[in-house]
Image (cartoon, helix red, strand yellow):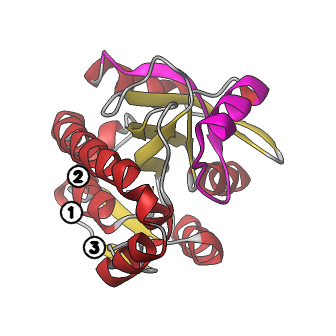
């Protein structure tokens, strides 16, 4: 997959990848070490920009499912990575109701409300995901413009149940059998799983609406016109 001159959207769910795809946008849908390798390759092939796009866990208590967060920067265990100001400004112009604030990246989902509160107090970040810190670090290393644009799926007061966390295949699609096995082992998680499913529908609808508004290149403000004519494929892990 060639990414030269295109924006690379970084996701971990197949749904996010399908929504992000469009003119001027290549999509990487990978996890952990695979994500690092794919992003390094995309950067070396000449990616014009890198954007962390998709859903996120809410950390600030005033954020609800479907609310947008445009990252002002990404906090990680290794430090802080600012986002590109011009790109963030362009995203906020298209998504005027979005919160412009810090996002924190973690290697694993943050499932419990008490964990979310602690992370919010420690970092000041309003949302958390498992890709932004990887994308930010690689974009900074290659001096590529970076942005983060995420819709909240699980608010700060909601529990992310085990079936939702572990019921995914490596390619970002749902593993229905794994979800069912998890519910059978721990049926008490069913109410939380039902809420997560409802919140996921709200977040997915917000992603689709926002994606249509962002248009070609996911709001990237530094494109040359010919690049926008292409439609890129999705690279799945």
Is residue 48 toward the left or the right of residue 203 in the image? right
Q: Which residue is mark 3?
A: 233
- Taking the spot 73% from the left edge, 32% from the top edge, the residue there is 118
Residue 9 in view of the camera: no
Local packing at callout 1 (Cα closer than 10 Å; few below 14, some 14-19, many 20+) is: some
- Taking the spot 21% from the left edge, 63% from the top edge, the residue there is 230
Q: Earlier in the sequence, mark 2 or mark 3?
A: 2
Number of numbered discs visible in the structure rendering: 3
Rounded to the nearest whole Å, what is the CA distance between mark 2 and mark 1?
6 Å
Element under disc 2: helix
Q: Which residue is mark 1?
A: 230
> Where are the magenta residues, as a range?
96-122
Element under disc 1: loop
Hey, which quadrant is residue 83 in on the image? top right
Rounded to the nearest whole Å, what is the CA distance between mark 3 and mark 1?
10 Å
Circles 2 and 1: CB distance less than 8 Å? yes
């Amino acid at each position: 997959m060639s990414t030269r001159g295109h924006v690379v959207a970084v996701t971990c769910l197949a749904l996010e990848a399908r929504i992000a795809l469009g003119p001027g946008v290549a999509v990487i849908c990978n996890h952990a070490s695979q994500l690092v390798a794919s992003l390094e390759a995309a950067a070396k092939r000449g990616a014009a920009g890198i954007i962390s796009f998709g859903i996120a866990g809410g950390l600030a208590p005033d954020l609800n499912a479907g609310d947008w967060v445009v990252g002002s920067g990404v906090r990680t265990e290794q430090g802080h990575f600012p986002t590109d100001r011009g790109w963030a400004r362009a995203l906020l112009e298209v998504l005027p109701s979005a919160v412009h604030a810090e996002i924190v990246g973690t290697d694993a989902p943050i499932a419990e409300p008490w964990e979310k509160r602690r992370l919010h107090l420690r970092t000041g970040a309003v949302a958390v995901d498992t890709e932004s810190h990887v994308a930010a670090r690689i974009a900074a290393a290659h001096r590529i413009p970076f942005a983060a644009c995420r819709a909240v799926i699980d608010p700060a007061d909601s529990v992310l149940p085990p079936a939702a966390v572990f019921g995914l295949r490596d390619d970002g699609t749902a593993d229905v059998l794994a979800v069912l096995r998890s519910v059978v082992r721990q049926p008490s998680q069913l109410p939380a799983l039902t809420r997560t499913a409802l919140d996921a529908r709200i977040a997915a609808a917000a992603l689709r609406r926002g994606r249509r508004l962002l248009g070609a290149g996911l709001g990237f403000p530094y494109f040359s016109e010919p690049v926008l004519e292409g439609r890129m494929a999705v690279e799945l892990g």
